Every structure is written in C-alpha cells, then in structure tokens.
Image (spheres, rainbow, N blue to C red):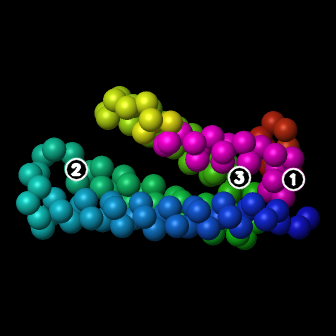
Amino acid sequence: MSRPFGVYILAFAWLLGGTVYVLQGLQLTTAVTFGHMPTGTGEWLWGWIIVLTGLLFWGAGAAALGGQAWAWTLGMFLALWGLFQAAIIIIGVGTLEQALIATMFPVVVLWYLNREPVRAFFRVDEGGSTV
C-alpha cells in the first residue's frame, strides 16, 4: 500500500514538535541546574518529562516515515496526551481561547489517524489492533 501524503506531513510535524519539546525541556532543566530558578519547585522534573515527550514525538515521526504499525498507536497516545495538556492549560491559564488552540492539533490527528486509508497503511483494523 502506498503511503498517504498526510503521513509525510504528520511525520514532519511530529519530528518538528519533538525537536521543540526536547529543546524546551533541556532549557527548563538547565535553567534549574545552572540558572537562577529555585530548586524544589518541580521544574527540573517537568523539564525531563518534556524531554521524554519530545523523544516520543521523534519516535512517532520516524516510525510513521518507516511505515511501522506501532506508529499509529503511539500517534493516538500522543494525541490523547495533547488533549490532556489542553485540559491542563485551561486549568492553569484559565483562558478558553488558549485551550481551544491547544486542542485543535490533537483533534485533527485523532481524526486523520482514524481515516480508512491511514488505518490501512499502518495495518490497523477497526478494533485498533494491528493486522
């Protein structure tokens, strides 16, 4: 089966997003370690969680380009993680506009990954298991 064009776009977005996450996480951890941020606030731990999320995005992007079946599952997980982050934004920041903006990309990814040509490319059946 030929790769749908949207998979290229999605893989590029995941690779780019992974790069941004890794850089932001490293910036946060080094600001605590070498900078002026106080320790004991959880910033250092959250920085490493952000780095780990970036590595997951890189893995999803590389797997999507390689046509790996598990890329679909990882993409679904990352989209749900994005929805969780949008919920945290509305709790933390309190503005509906920012939460809606943060929700848009994960919703589009969930929709796209569940389209029939994409599911067929990643060899995923209707139940979500690989064929």
Determine the secondary structure under disc 2: helix
Q: Mark 2 is on which residue type?
A: Glu
Which disc number belongs to residue 78?
A: none
Residue contact between numbered discs 1 and 3, judged by CB atoms under 8 Å: no
- Tell which circle, 2 or 1, labels the residue nearer the N-terminal end: 2
Please provide the residue range marked out in magenta: 101-122
Which disc number belongs to residue 72?
A: 3
Residue 27 magenta-highlighted? no
Determine the residue positioned at 81% across, 46% down.
115
Determine the residue positioned at 58% across, 47% down.
105
Which disc number belongs to residue 117?
A: 1
User: Which-is-in-front pick, marks 2 and 1?
Assistant: 1
Q: CA distance from mark 2 to mark 1?
A: 41 Å
Residue tagged 2: 43
Looking at the picture, tell me which residue is in the foreground, 130 or 67.
67
Answer left or right for 33 relative to 104. Answer: left
Q: Mark 1 is on which residue type?
A: Pro
